[in-house]
Image (cartoon, helix red, strand yellow):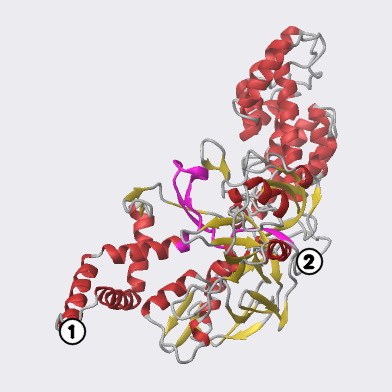
Amino acid sequence: MPFIYFYLFLLLHPYLGMWWKVFEKADRNAWEALVPGYNYFIAFKIGCNKPWWALLMLIPGVHLAMWSVCNTSLIRRFGGYSVTATLEGIFFPYRAFYTIQSNPELKIQAETNWANSGEMEKRKWGDHIVLALTLPVLGHAVALVHQSVTRHKPGEKSKIKDWGDNLLFALIAASIIRTYVFEPFQIPTGSMEKTLLVGDFLFVNKLSYGPKVPVTPLSFPLVHNTVPWVNIKSYTDFEKGTYFRLPGFTDVKRNDVVVFNYPSGDTAVYDPRVPDGLMGHDYHGIVISEAKELFKSDPETNKNAQIAQTFYTDSLKKATLNPVLADSFTQLFLGRLLIQNFNKYTAMARTMLSEQKIAHDMATGGIIQHFGLIYRPVDKRENYIKRCVGVPGDWLEIRASVLYVNGKPAFVPENQNLQYTVSNFNELNTPTMIQKYGLEKSRKDYQLLPDGRYIMQLTKTQKQQLKRDFPDAKFEIDLQTQYSDNPKYKPSSLDFINNLSYFPKDLYVNNTVTDFTRFQIPKKGQKIRIHKDNIAWYRRIITAYEGHSLQEKKDGIYIDGKKASHYTFSMNYYWMMGDNRYQSADSRFWGFVPEDHIVGRASLVWFSKSADPSIGIRWERLFKWIR
């Protein structure tokens, strides 16, 4: 339900509750209940003598909590301390307000005398309800433990009331800060090594680009999209807004380190038995993997494989049969069959994931029963952190692992990693590798291959140090060139299938982790010509991000049912890449990041701890600004 309806409800609420009669019983003027906004100011003044709390009702995410506080406080000034009255004040206060205004003998009462045990007992269970709803179980545990080790002094609030009030407004304040000012974030993966390390804890500055107003403000406080330990959704989309961003200090700039909502995370495979309740949040990548598995397990596929092998064997008359070559021929034949039937198998995969709720276990080859799909609004998708290497309107290209922006080599971060195969190198002991070169095996900075060579993720400085200290070592950068650069090369069906691994995940667009076709990042208001040769780059923008229907027919492209030759973008888009270029799932895999997915700028590492027990806390990284 859109925000506007909730704010209209808040405006109408004082009239529905007949506040003018309630105000009169509180020795206020009736007209004060009829002035929008001012009536809440007076209601908070009557209820708890904190009129400024009315301002908090303007903030999505806390407005309904403050509405409950306002009602409950007002009802309690007329003696409504019972469990029933408390629950009515929190959820549906109209019966209580009717009772107040219709009972001629009911007058406003003095605030609770905390030195009077009878008054404390009268409100005890209502206060228990407030504390239980504020912080279930844990709130009571803290309050009761504190109560058992301290002594209550006459005239002080009860521990339950005191902790209920403190926790409620601590959570409200923390929610406001977390939503609109800054948010703590932990680096979970090595995609930004060695600029940011696994185990870094940092603050995300939301004021830089302007804080987003939550799309789903009704949410369990201080968690993102899942309640810890119980693995259930932390939010409801009963109240749902549209994208709106408050003014910020600056726009997203090229080379900023940015936190954003994962663009491909609109759908996830839900399973509470695994960490974070997810089998994987890249649903679209899972669909492709499942389509391949369904193809492999299809009896028709096995039948065709046998036919292909028999045909090849017979054609050679079994005289010079090369089993390896025969197998390659079979794979190429099957690859072409998969391409021809790709839409069929992806449709089967979607049905299997959504309706049958099963998936393939890629480790064991078996089948997993999961709990279905969950659909996440923008602000509840997984948080990712990368470097923004391209802003709206930029032209980007990657050649031999070198990024070009608008035709020029891009800025290279000081700690950017590239991947090298290193030969003639004798590994030193682990402490020396860490202390002298900053290379941690636990972070997979280097790995020994069976043939004695090493795979290393190195910055420019680290490579220079190693070359100086190991002059016989040979460093070869690992490249995955594009077959499309070679006009004489005829791609096989397997090449087409491999194209599905990289954006735009189209069978016929050839990109790799080190070489990427030149393209432009869309800009708000930009109008482009669309056709069958470029539509792959914009399918997800048109459908998932900007909400249109898209059909690709033989006679052209149709948007919202109308044939279209051009498209105008409604939002700005960005291109994000990890500094650990070969170990980063970034825009090269899932494409453009829309402006409504931007969360904030990574500003400060406030704590860091290595998974390697020999390192422990990285003291040199504490309170380090992110450049």
Q: Is residue 302 left or right of residue 438?
A: left
Residue drawn at (71%, 32%) of the image = 168
- Above/below status of 154 relative to 625: above
Q: CA distance from mark 2 to mark 1?
A: 65 Å
The one of 510 and 552 positioned closer to us in this rendering: 510
Q: Is residue 573 visible?
A: yes
Residue drawn at (46%, 75%) of the image = 499
- Mark 1: few, some, or many residues within 10 Å (few <14, many ≥20)? few
Amino acid carrying label 2: it is Asp
Residue 251's tag is: 2
Q: Nearer the viewer, mark 2 or mark 1?
A: 1
Amino acid carrying label 1: it is Leu
- Above/below status of 165 relative to 183: above
Question: Which residues are drawn in magenta?
Answer: 257-285
Q: Which residue is mark 1?
A: 316
Residue 272 forms part of the magenta stretch: yes
- Above/below status of 225 relative to 467: above
- Secondary structure beneath dot 2 equals loop
Residue drawn at (21%, 65%) of the image = 299
Mark sitting earlier along the chain (2/1): 2
Q: Residue furthest bottom?
A: 488
Q: x%, y% of residue 186?
A: 66, 47
Q: x%, y% of residue 592?
A: 61, 70
Q: Is residue 343 left or right of residue 488?
A: left
Image quadrant in which the C terminus is located: bottom right
Q: Quadrant of residue 317?
A: bottom left
